[in-house]
Image (cartoon, grey):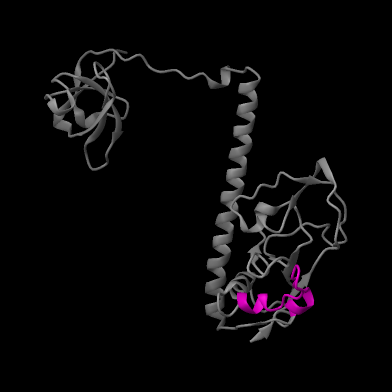
């Protein structure tokens, strides 16, 4: 066992700061958001130094721990700081846990050790003091003892933890970019811009037959035998809506029916209709 301080990590909090709303301010990352998938960082506050050497910002590779709240809730939970939090100001309810130049274990291993259901989380939560809203003090966390394994075992665990955090961060960033793009498209649509939403469909004309094995999705086809159970006669025309890799098609029939019919058909049960150039 070794304490967090002896492992070469620093633990601190920024000073308590006011959250002054500001449209052009910095995005605030609160203590619950770090435990959510793609947190909504839409809340903006006026920028400042926040009584912190990093002006409230956090860096990838640090750990963030909720240090207040009920012990049956998020209090004592730990999360990775990743590229998804770049430029965001983290709440003063999040302890910063950062490796120093003399660190003897990696952040990924410390993250798993602090999160362990038997050797981590219960010990972290036991540090909380206060009856109304329990808090965890940074100095107490520095003294918390962490289980040590062999260097190879710790590095293997750290690799997996850090890779997982990086994948989640990339997914969060991508989802945020998609949401921003969708928002811009909605604004264009509401402003009356229809050009960005115009799509064209090819005109399909029935001519010569083609081999069913070469039929792609959306091809027009003709049924080669009757399907009386679904009121389809031989020669009924439909559209391929899915092509199976192992063979076969999902075909949708509309013409002359009261409701669409989708059938799974083999290649020898349909023939394709090629469009004129």
In-image side of 93 versus 204 (left or right): right
In-image side of 81 versus 262 (left or right): right
User: With respect to residue 11, does 24 lie above or below?
Assistant: above
In-image side of 195 versus 221 (left or right): right
Q: Where is residue 250 in the image (x, y as percent from the top left)?
A: 26, 33
Q: Position of residue 210 (x, y in %)?
A: 20, 22
In the picture, residue 74 is in which quadrant? bottom right
User: With respect to residue 194, does 61 lie above or below?
Assistant: below
Residue beneath the point at 28% across and 16% down: 275
In the picture, residue 212 is in which quadrant? top left
User: With respect to residue 196, does 216 lie above or below?
Assistant: below
Residue beneath the point at 86% across and 63% down: 15
Q: Position of residue 174 (x, y in %)?
A: 58, 45
Residue beneath the point at 63% across and 87% down: 1
What's drawn in magenta, residue-wise? 121-142
Q: Quick check: is 39 in the magenta stretch?
A: no
Quick one: 36 or 48, which is closer to the camera?
A: 36
In-image side of 147 versus 62 (left or right): left
- Report the quarter where the C terminus lies: top left
In the picture, residue 72 is in which quadrant? bottom right
Residue beneath the point at 66% across and 70% down: 71
Q: Where is residue 96 in the image (x, y as percent from the top left)?
A: 74, 66
């Amino acid at each position: 066992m070794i304490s967090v301080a002896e492992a070469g990590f620093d633990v601190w909090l920024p000073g308590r700061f006011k959250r002054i709303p500001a449209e052009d301010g910095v995005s605030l990352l609160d203590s619950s958001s770090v435990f959510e998938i793609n947190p909504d960082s839409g809340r903006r506050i006026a920028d400042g130094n926040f009584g912190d050497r990093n002006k409230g910002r956090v860096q990838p590779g640090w750990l963030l721990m909720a240090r207040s709240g009920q012990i049956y809730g998020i209090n004592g939970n730990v999360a990775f700081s990743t590229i998804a939090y770049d430029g965001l100001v983290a709440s003063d309810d999040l302890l910063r846990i950062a490796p120093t130049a003399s660190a003897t274990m990696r952040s990924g291993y410390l993250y798993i050790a602090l999160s362990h259901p038997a050797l981590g989380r219960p010990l972290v939560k036991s540090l909380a003091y206060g009856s109304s809203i329990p808090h965890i003090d940074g100095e107490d966390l520095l003294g918390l003892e962490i289980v040590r394994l062999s260097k190879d075992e710790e590095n293997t665990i750290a690799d997996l933890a850090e890779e997982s955090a990086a994948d989640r961060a990339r997914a969060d960033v991508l989802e945020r970019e998609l949401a921003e793009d969708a928002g811009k498209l909605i604004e264009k649509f509401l402003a009356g811009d229809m050009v960005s939403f115009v799509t064209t469909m090819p005109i399909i004309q029935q001519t010569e037959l083609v081999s069913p094995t070469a039929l792609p999705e959306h091809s027009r086809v003709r049924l080669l035998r009757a399907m009386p159970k679904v009121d389809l006669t031989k020669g009924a025309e439909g559209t391929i809506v899915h092509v199976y890799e192992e063979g076969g098609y999902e075909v949708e029939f509309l013409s002359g029916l009261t409701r669409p019919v989708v059938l799974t058909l083999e290649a020898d049960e349909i023939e394709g209709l090629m469009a004129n150039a």
